[in-house]
Image (tube, grey):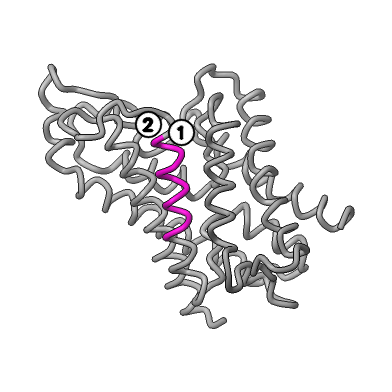
């Protein structure tokens, strides 16, 4: 895979992921949305379908990682670290772009947020926040949830017939043909339903950091703080989870 393919694939795929994910959060959160207050299950499935669309789109170009934690897990498994910075940078750019696109899609609803009667907190549309603020506990949650994502992705390759396989010797493709991406998208839905309650399940540093940057600079009325004091948790926790997943995979499998 060329550097250009990796960059374009990860930017486009991650942008689609965040467009769907931030989009469903906006749909559920903002007033004057037809999906207003439709709940956590809708959010979990929206993010899962975002993975489905983004990963299938990116897979032919870049392998469709869309997540630095996945990239790190693959690098630990394969020993190929040379393109990890390119993957991570591309994912951050894509996440920022996807957040801006979601803002544009709901621009009228965000503008209505200027009315005190319609004002809604907006950071949760873009990034995660804990229900109980305890950095140590929040970090453990994000680490565990990310292992629940990355380790199965790596292990799926040992299951015959589901179309997942790593490109030998490359920290690149994790998806082949078949139902592989569908399985990963359902896995993300399951993580959201099972482990998303404490922190909102970032499980992806780019998914949280890129949209948080967008939230901090976009002209959103009554947007409040971008909560940079918490921002390290959904970055460090998933990276630890990706690293642990690669190590566990190498030892056990």
- Determine whether 170 is above or below 34 in the image: below
Looking at the magenta stretch, what is its main secondary structure? helix
* Residue 31 at x, y percent in the picture: 19, 28
Residue drawn at point x = 62 percent, y = 72 percent = 173
* Residue 153 at x, y percent in the picture: 67, 56
- Determine whether 158 is above or below 24 in the image: below
Q: Within the image, what quadrant is residue 83 found in?
A: bottom right
- Determine whether 167 is above or below 42 in the image: below
Q: Which residue is mark 1?
A: 128
Indicate the secondary structure of the residue bearing disc 1: loop
Q: Distance between the Cα atoms at labels 2 and 1?
A: 6 Å
Residue drawn at point x = 64 percent, y = 69 percent = 163
Q: Which residue is mark 2?
A: 124
| Label pair 2/1, CB-CB below 8 angstroms | yes
* Residue 207 at x, y percent in the picture: 47, 47
Residue drawn at point x = 52 percent, y = 79 percent = 3
- In the image, the segment drawn in magenta is 42-53
Seen in the image, is 226 located left or right of residue 218?
A: right
10 Å crowding of disc 1: few (<14), some (14-19), many (20+): many
């Amino acid at each position: 895979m060329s550097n250009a393919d990796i960059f374009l694939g990860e930017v486009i795929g991650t942008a689609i992921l965040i467009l769907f994910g931030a989009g469903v959060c906006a749909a559920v959160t903002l007033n004057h949305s037809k999906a207003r207050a439709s709940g956590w299950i809708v959010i979990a499935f929206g993010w899962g379908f975002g993975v489905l669309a983004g990963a299938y789109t990116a897979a032919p170009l870049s392998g469709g990682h869309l997540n630095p934690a996945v990239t790190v897990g693959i690098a630990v498994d394969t020993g190929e670290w040379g393109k990890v910075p390119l993957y991570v940078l591309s994912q951050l750019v894509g996440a920022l772009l996807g957040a801006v696109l979601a803002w544009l899609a709901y621009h009228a609803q965000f503008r209505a947020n200027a009315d005190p009667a319609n004002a809604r907190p907006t950071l949760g549309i873009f990034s995660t926040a804990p229900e109980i603020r305890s950095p140590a506990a929040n970090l453990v949650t994000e680490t565990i949830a990310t292992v629940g994502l990355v380790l199965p992705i790596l292990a799926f390759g040992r299951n015959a017939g589901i179309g997942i396989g790593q490109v030998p010797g490359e920290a690149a493709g994790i998806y082949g043909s078949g139902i592989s991406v569908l399985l990963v998208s359902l896995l993300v839905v399951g993580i959201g339903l099972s482990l998303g309650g404490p922190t909102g399940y970032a499980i992806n540093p780019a998914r949280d950091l890129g949209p948080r940057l967008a939230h901090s600079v976009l002209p959103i009325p009554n947007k409040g703080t971008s909560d940079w004091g918490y921002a390290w948790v959904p970055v460090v926790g998933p990276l630890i989870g990706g690293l642990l997943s690669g190590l566990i995979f190498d030892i056990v499998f």
